[in-house]
Image (spheres, rainbow, N blue to C red):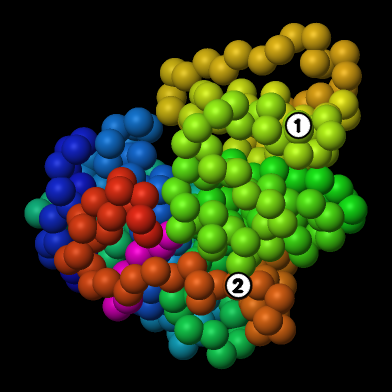
Amino acid sequence: MKAAVLREVNTPLDVEEVSIADPGPREVVVRTGASGVCHSDLHFVEGLYATRFPVILGHEAAGTIEAVGELVDYVKPGDRVICCLSVFCGHCERCTEGRTVLCSRTGLTRGPDETPRLSSDGEAVTQFANLGSFAEYMLVHENSVVKIDRDVPFEQLALIGCGATTGLGAALNTAAVRPGSAVAVIGCGGVGLNAIQGAALAGALRIIAVDAVETKLTLAREFGATDVIDASSGDVASRVRDLTGGGVDYSFEAIGKKETAEQAFDMLRAGGTATVIGMIPQGTKIELDGPSFLREKRIQGSSMGSNHFRTDMPRYVEFYLQGRLKLDELVTQRIQLDQVNKAFEDMKEGSVARSVIVF
Ligand SMILES: [Zn+2]
Ligand SMILES: [Zn+2]
């Protein structure tokens, strides 16, 4: 099969031929229908997070089941699925207490003595996030997919696979935004826009979008923001406090930077909660105002929107079909696999909400 392979940090991905093994007992082969190009992929290209090389990036995908292992009964060939990097085992401590997104993830990949799932000239190829969707096919554990029996295009389903779920889930699951509350979202890319529409779905009264790019703020209003703040000048946290008469109940950081994580905490009112969604580079420390903890201000992380993707994702599909969730507007350009490097360039420029590779 053809796949875009990254062999070294800060080099272009190369579309080449990669061999794919037969599915093991609990594995499935997915024929990729569409894959979004997500900011997290770029973090690994740029070496802000470590991975093993060569690697096939891509983790925001949907497709069709092509083949299944002998023990798989959840899906069958021909089923349409969304893939999710939150693969779960179902029996570790976190899984059994209902937090599958924090699964210890043992026994879900192949061991070093087994035939690798993917290889190139006899060398094992890493699947990013156990998926590797910049490829025509993915060989994954059956607990990496959720069946979707509704007629929605792969591009939209792919976005639910990461960006939409990460943003919506941060608002609906991690922070559990309450009706009538005041919310601020820093960073209005794909994930931030979904945090905005998640807050709107939850009934937030005031949703303040913060970004330095004008077009993203315009989009933020369409996604439910009631106020926007241009972050290119001035003290963002104090402007949010001024707008709300003291701060917001919930803030969301959807960029992944020290400064914006600190801003998210600084813009809270007493009792407020900051949720950091962005991937802050490895080794980064953030600084917070200590006395704020006496006012019961909190800061927390959110992993993939604290999802239970097998129940969350079909619900997001229904919200979309009811017209209560925007996904079409997030697909800014459809591209081919060999244009993936261009998609990263566009992302760095900050002009594009989402490039989606269509197969
Ligand atoms: Zn992602
Ligand atoms: Zn588990």
Residue at left 65%, top 53%?
195
* Residue 343, image quadrant: bottom left
Give the image location of residue 149, x and y in percent.
61, 86
In this picture, is 207 found above or below 62?
Answer: above
- Residue 241 numbered mark, or none: 1
Tell me, yes or no, if residue 214 can be seen here: yes
Residue nearer the viewer, 32 or 60: 60
In this picture, is 210 found above or below 60?
Answer: above
* 147 in magenta: no
The magenta-colored residue range is 353-359
- Mark 1 touches mark 2? (CB < 8 Å): no
Give the image location of residue 259, x and y in percent.
53, 24
Q: Is residue 111 left or right of residue 206?
A: left
Q: How many numbered circles does the render carry?
A: 2
| Residue type beneath disc 2 | Lys
Residue at left 62%, top 61%?
221
Front position among marks 1 and 2: 1
Residue at left 87%, top 26%?
270
Tell me, yes or no, if residue 308 can be seen here: no
| Residue type beneath disc 1 | Arg
Q: Residues within 10 Å of mark 2 (few under 14, many from 20)?
A: some
Residue nearer the viewer, 314 or 102: 314
Helix, strand or loop under label 2: loop
Helix, strand or loop under label 1: helix
Give the image location of residue 182, x and y in percent.
81, 46
Q: Residues within 10 Å of mark 1 (few under 14, many from 20)?
A: some
Residue nearer the viewer, 136 or 182: 182
What residue is disc 2 on? 326
In this picture, is 190 found above or below 233?
Answer: below
* 354 in magenta: yes
Q: Is residue 183 left or right of residue 252?
A: right
In this picture, is 328 found above or below 121?
Answer: below
